[in-house]
Every structure is written in C-alpha cells, then in structure tokens.
Image (cartoon, coloured by chain):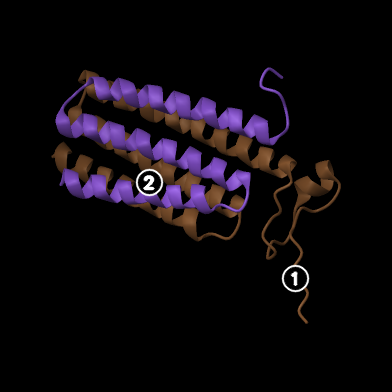
Amino acid sequence: MSSIIFSILAIGGFLCLYRIYQGPSISDRAVGVDIMGILFVGITALSALFYDLSYLMDLSITLAMFSFIGTLALAKYLEKRSLDD
Amino acid sequence: MISPIGWIIIWIGVFFDILGAVGLVRFPDVYNRLQASTKCVTLGTFGIMIGIFLLKGFSPMGIKALICGGFLLLTSPVAAHALMKGSLHFGTKMWKGSVVDKYGEDKLGGEQIEKPKEEK
C-alpha cells in the first residue's frame, strides 16, 4: 500500500514541477513552490507512519514552518517590498 | 474499529492532494490555480495528519501529527492570501473570462482583467 500512496503523491509533485517549469509568470512559479512544499509535508508524515520513525514527524513540522516562511518571503518580493518592511 | 477509519481518511487526503495538483496544471490563470490547489492540498494534508493521529493514538507520533495539522490549517490560508495580494500588486492579469475585480478598482486604479484578443 505504501508504494501506491507514494507514487500518487510523487505524481502530484511532478505536476507541480511542470507548473514551475512552464508557468507564464513569476506568480505561477511561486504558487507551484508553495503547493509542492505542502505536498512534501504530507509525504514526510506518511513515511514517518510507514517506516515507524518518530523523528520524521519532527522533520514534517519543520518543513511546514520553512515552507510558510518561504512563501511569505516570495509574496513580499512579488509585492515589491523589502524583507524587513 | 479505529484503524479502517484512519486508512479511509488517509486515502481521502491523498485523493484531495492529487486533485489539487491536477487543478494546479489545468486551470487558466494564477488566481484560479491558487484557489483550487491551496484549498485541496491543505485539506488533503490535514486529512493525512488526522489519519495518522487516528492510527497512532496518543503516542508521540500521533500528537506531533495533530500539532502539524493544526499548524498547516493556521498557516496555509495566510500564505495563500499573501501570494494573491502579492501577485495582484505585481500586475499579473486575471483570465479574460473573469467578470469583476473590486480590489483592483479600489486599490490599483482599474480592473486587472486581461483583454481578449481582437479577432480579425
């Protein structure tokens, strides 16, 4: 069962990569990066469940935080404000 | 009894994840893509976290999964709104089939809707 779930989520990640490569504007690429970060949070949590490694769940929380901060930084860059504004 | 419910919720989460990724590819402009994919992927990953909590119970992994789900539920809509406001201020045009843009009329001095091309 784990291989099927990981394959489906990996297909989702490749769709996000297609949007990052193809996207007509910078905003599309930013959206793709955000969605791919949240997908990776799910993949990390599922691998913590399947391999029974509890520290991967810590990694999942950290990945969610870094994805959030990175998306906010991209949004500030798109809004033409400096990062310490 | 808890275990099949947890697996069903995990499968629902994976299904919503792949729907959000398909919406990211298929929709016509950045705002539609942002709405479809952010909502679907947030709900999908939150479902995965709730499923892990139901499977593992009140063990360290289950509590961490619950904390991670709550964090995602709080921060992902904030990130989506910040991206949408940023791309409006950046000047990304809406799809040409859009109807109304009140934010652009108020703050940016005109609707940000892409004009359809002239047919010859």
Q: Is residue B68 visible?
A: yes
Viewed as shown, does residue A12 lie left or right of A52? right
Residue marked by disc 2: A13
- Determine the secondary structure under disc 2: helix
Quarter of the image containing the N terminus of chain B?
top left
| Residue at figure coordinates x 29%, y 32% from the top left | A44
Front residue of B113/B68: it is: B113
Location of residue A39 (image quadrant): top left
Location of residue B108 (image quadrant): top right
| Circles 1 and 2 on the same chain | no
Viewed as shown, does residue A44 lie left or right of A81? left
- Determine the secondary structure under disc 1: loop
The crowd level at tag 2 (other Cα within 10 Å; few <14, some 14-19, many 20+) is many
Kind of residue at badge 2: Gly
Q: Output the letter for the chain in purple.
A: A
| Residue at figure coordinates x 27%, y 44% from the top left | B9
Front residue of A17/A4: it is: A17
Q: Output the letter for the chain in brown.
A: B
Kind of residue at badge 1: Lys
| Residue at figure coordinates x 75%, y 53% from the top left | B101
